[in-house]
Image (tube, rainbow, N blue to C red):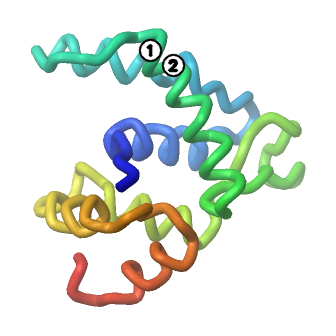
Amino acid sequence: MTTYNWDLIERLLHEAQNSAGHNFTPRPYAEQYAAEKSAAGEQIENLDHLKTVAGEYEKLLLLRGYIEPRPEDQGGNGSNYILTMRGSCLLSLLDSCIPGNDHPRQVLDEQEDPLDEATFERIASNAQIA
C-alpha cells in the first residue's frame, strides 16, 4: 500500500496554484513546510528526505495529471504549473482549512495507491467522501 504525506502534497498543490510568474521549487517548499511543523511543535522527518520526497511528488503529480505546465498567458515561465481539474479536486479533498478534512484523507489512505489516476477518479466521484 502506498502512503503519502498529505500535508506536504497539499502544500505543493497550493504552491503550484499560486506559482504564476515564479518557478515552482519543491525543495524549498519542503523546508518551509518542515519549519512550520517544527514551529508548531510537531515532529518532522529528516529534512533531506523530505526535500527528496517533495521532488518525487512534483514528478508524480505532473505524470499523473494533477498539475500541468502553466501557460505563458497565465504567468507561465516553463518552470511552474497550474492545477488540472484532478489536481483541484485533490486539493479540495486535502484542504486543511476545511473542517472535517480527515475523512477524505482516511478514505485515500485506505486505497492501494490513492493517486493512481483510475483509483482517484473513482474515489473523487463518490459524493460521500467529502
What element does badge 1 sit on? helix
Q: Residue at x 78, y 51 (%)?
A: 70
Residue 20 image position (x, y, % from top left): 70, 41
Residue 126 image position (x, y, % from top left): 32, 88
* Above or below, 86 relative to 96: below
Q: Is residue 55 left or right of residue 101?
A: right
Query: In the depicted view, which residue is nearer to us: 83 or 74?
Result: 83
Q: Quadrant of the N terminus?
A: bottom left
Asked if disc 1 and disc 2 are in contact, CB closer than 8 Å, the reply is yes
Find disc 2 in the rendering and name its residue. Answer: 51
Mark 1 or mark 2: which comes first in sequence?
A: 1
Residue 68 image position (x, y, % from top left): 74, 56
Measured Cα–Cα span from mark 1 to mark 2: 7 Å
Q: Quadrant of the C terminus?
A: bottom left
Q: Residue at x 24, y 69 (%)?
A: 107
Find disc 1 in the rendering and name its residue. Answer: 31
Query: In the depicted view, which residue is nearer to us: 14 or 60?
Result: 60
Between disc 1 and disc 2, the foreground one is 2
Q: Residue furthest front?
A: 1
Q: Residue at x 38, y 64 (%)?
A: 112
